[in-house]
Image (tube, rainbow, N blue to C red):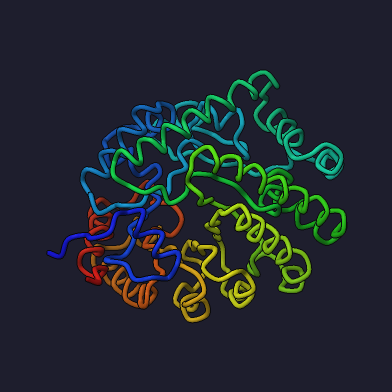
Amino acid sequence: MTKDVMTPEERIQAAINLEPVDRVVCAPMIDQYAGQFAGMLNKDFMHDWEKCMGAIDKVKEAYPIWDSNPFIMCERIAPYMQIIGLMRTKMPGTELEDNASFQMHEFEAMTREDLDIILNEGLFPYIIKFCQVSHGSTVEQIMAALPEKAKLHADEVRRTLARGQSPTWSILGGSGPDVISMTRSLEKYFRDVRQIPDKLYAVMERVTDEMIALLAAQADQTGIRRAFIGDSRSSAQWLSLKVFENMLLPLMKRLVNGLNEKNIIPILHYDSDWTDNLEYLLQLPAKKFVLQLDGATDIFKAKDVLGGHCAIMGDVHASMLSVGSPDDVDAYAKKLIQYVGKGGGLIYSTGCCMPMNAKHENVKAFFDAVDKYGRYN
């Protein structure tokens, strides 16, 4: 078998730059599946940091070809997600059964009037109030949790590097639309889009600018200048192309260009169906962002439209991994690697997170496909 000749970091940088690689970057979002793979209850995985990290170690030991880790567990670990998380959650072992997946619950935590907090005081006071309303957190609890989560963040980077992996990203952020819609609720956000578009745009502009500054400060601390950017609610699945052109695309450009000015590559985590929006992404700077898809968007059309413009990350579907067969996974992975990976620019991954109930034989087929179809040297 041909051996690797690039390091994981060299490989992902080359993929982002649309340059040749020795083999496809392998970067599944493992998430809660790791605990199931390690044979533990999800309550232990979600509540115990050492057990959580140990389970991820076991996945890497079993599948050494997993070379780039798109981690987010420092944001999801229960003790802090239920104090400072960006949505209300229910966790296994407390609100849910011991081996249930955690849940995120959408509701109107912040009112339309609360948007004035962002305009008058900034994003951080708005988030503090959200945590108070959503989680019942006190200011003291919030301020104590933030540095503790930062320690987990640093530990997660250290552990990723110790496994011989590259961090796919090391900082986590969201677009203005995601921040507002997740705190206001999707329904209320859509009403705001129709009823107060000018005020909403001004709010999201300020969120965008403060997000850029926050992510730049975190990148300076970690030394890894790639950022996860959640934006799952701006696509044509949710809002018209007219709204996208007039409001959401300018915000997207502002965010991507602002991060690029800080020498940060945003990885645009675009859940939902972006197929009708793909042409607009040609207006973003070439080779300066990654488009991450979850299976709802036609990733093959994305390659047709954006091949030669940006790297594409994805998208072995959660449903295929959980209810399909190894042959289904193998056939899709082959097409994905050979079509989307043709000419470079593919970061081979799951469609969003590896489902917690993925069949172990399907996960094996996912990883085996890298050697079978993804070696170019």
- Residue 101: percent from left, percent from top: 44, 40
Quarter of the image containing the C terminus?
bottom left
Q: Given the current orientation, which residue lies at the most extreme bottom position?
A: 304
Split into 4 quadrants, where in the image is the N terminus? bottom left
Residue 175 percent across, percent down from the top left: 66, 53
Residue in the image at 50% along x and 30% along y? 78
* Residue 286, percent from left and from top: 55, 71
Left or right of 301? Residue 62 is: left
Q: Is residue 274 above or below residue 9?
A: below
Instruction: Residue at 67%, 18% (x, y): give it.
Output: 140
Please give the count of numbered marks on the rendered protein. 0
Horizontal side of 276 relative to 157 (left or right) equals: right
Q: Which of 216 and 102 is in front in this view?
A: 216
- Could you say which is closer to the camera, residue 32 or residue 56? 56
Along the horizontal axis of the image, is 162 left or right of 107? left
Q: Residue furthest top?
A: 140
Residue 161: x, y in percent? 34, 41
In the image, residue 237 above or below residue 356: below
Q: Is residue 338 left or right of residue 97?
A: left
Res 285 → quadrant? bottom right
In front of the other: 80 or 362: 80
Q: Please tell me which residue is depicted at 32% across the width and 54% down the height of the picture.
A: 8
